[in-house]
Each structure stands twice: as C-alpha cells, then as structure tokens.
Amino acid sequence: MNNYRFSVIVEKDADGYFASCNELQGCYTQGETYEEAIGNIKDAIALHVEDRLEAGEEISQPQAVSLTLMDLVV
C-alpha cells in the first residue's frame, strides 16, 4: 500500500457540504454534514486512486496548495 496526500476543498451551502479533490479531476461528493462530506470524499478518493492504478495511470501529488478568500466589489 502507498501513502498519498491530496488537497480537499469543502464548501458549505444551503443544501449541506460539497467536497472536491483538485488533483483528481472529477473527484467530488457531498454530504449533509461536514463529517459526512469528509467521509464521502475519502471514499471517492480511494476509489478514484484504485481505478487509476488499475489503469496504469500516474497519481499526481500536489507540490504546494494555496487557498485565498477574496472580497470583490463589482
């Protein structure tokens, strides 16, 4: 087994929480609670990585991650 590190973004909206993994295109999920969204994205990432490894694809790892909240008046 290999150890991987991925960045996960969790956003809250009126319907709950949305989680996505930027390094794995198309890897996202949701949950009614933050904890549920985190559990779901862990499962989604594991399945995504397993599928890529079986297909012989490389698993990219982030070199650096930066997250900025920005206020903008238009």
Image: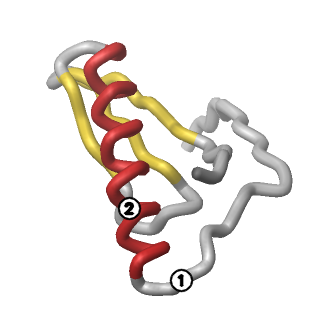
Q: Nearer the viewer, residue 18 or 62?
A: 62
Q: In the image, which disc is placed on residue 57?
A: 1
Work out how far the residue at label 2 is from the one at label 1, CA to CA, in angstroms: 11 Å
Element under disc 1: loop
Q: Is residue 20 depicted above or below 31 in this figure?
A: below
Q: Position of residue 24 (x, y in %)?
A: 49, 63
Please name the residue that numbered disc 2 is placed on.
48
Amino acid at the residue labelled 2 = His
Horizontal relation, residue 49 to residue 12: left or right: right
Amino acid at the residue labelled 1 = Glu
Residue 15, quarter of picture: top left
Q: Position of residue 20 (x, y in %)?
A: 42, 46
**Quadrant location of the C terminus?**
top right
Residue at 41% across, 30% down:
11
Residue neighbourhood size for the residue with mark 1, other residues' Cα within 10 Å, grouped as few (<14), some (14–19), many (≥20):
few
Sequence-earlier tag: 2 or 1: 2
Q: Is residue 54 depicted above or below 38 in this figure?
A: below
